[in-house]
Amino acid sequence: MITLLTNKQLSMNNYTFTTKKTFLLKRNVFFQQKIQKKNPKKNKDFKDFGSFLKLGVELISAIIVGLVIGLFLDNYFQSKPIFLFIFLILGFAAGIMNVFRSVKKLGFEVGFRKKK
């Protein structure tokens, strides 16, 4: 409940503030705490979304780079599928290694257990 006491005093839930700025700051903090109490899991879900998206991009980009290099070398040497398969496998291996290194930096071990 927000009420106006005088020209310079504002009240919210039995707290009196002398300036409008402190009133607005306290009200903002109050409503943020109220929102976090209602949805604590929602804020936690999107916290790691960027790091997991990075893992997928690293894997796919390494495979695509291997594919492009293999296609280029096959067209240059006129040997159709040989370099494509070689660099596709190398790109896949490089992508798995990048994902493994990134997961290790996140604090997970093999099997996705957090370090203590």
Image (cartoon, rainbow, N blue to C red):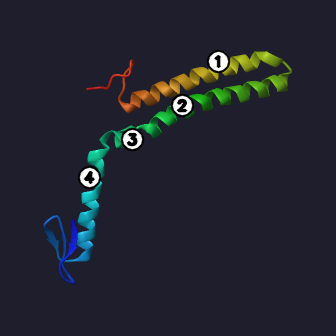
Residue occupied by mark 2? 56
Q: Position of residue 87 (x, y in %)?
A: 68, 21
Among numbered discs 3 and 4, the one appearing first in the sequence? 4
**Which numbered circle lies on residue 47?**
3
Answer left or right for 107 relative to 15: right
Q: Residue farthest to the left?
A: 14
Give the spatial CA distance, label 3 vs label 2.
Answer: 16 Å
User: CA separation, marks 2 and 1?
Assistant: 17 Å
* Label 1 secondary element: helix
Residue plotted at (50% across, 31% down): 55
- Residue occupied by mark 4: 34
Q: Amino acid at mark 3?
A: Lys
Point out residue 106 in the picture as x, y percentages from the top left corner. Answer: 38, 32
Q: Nearer the viewer, mark 2 or mark 1?
A: 2
Residue on which disc 1 sits: 89
* First in sequence: mark 4 vs mark 2: 4
Label 3, label 1: how many angstroms apart (C-alpha)? 33 Å
Give the mark, 1 or 4, whose residue is nearer the N terminus.
4
Task: Name which residue type carries label 2.
Answer: Gly
**Label 2 crowd bin: few (<14), some (14–19), many (20+), radius 10 Å:** few
Q: Amino acid at mark 1?
A: Ile
Q: What residue do we see at 58% from left, 20% from top?
A: 93
Q: Element type at marker 4?
A: helix
Tell me if label 4 and label 2 are in contact, CB under 8 Å.
Answer: no
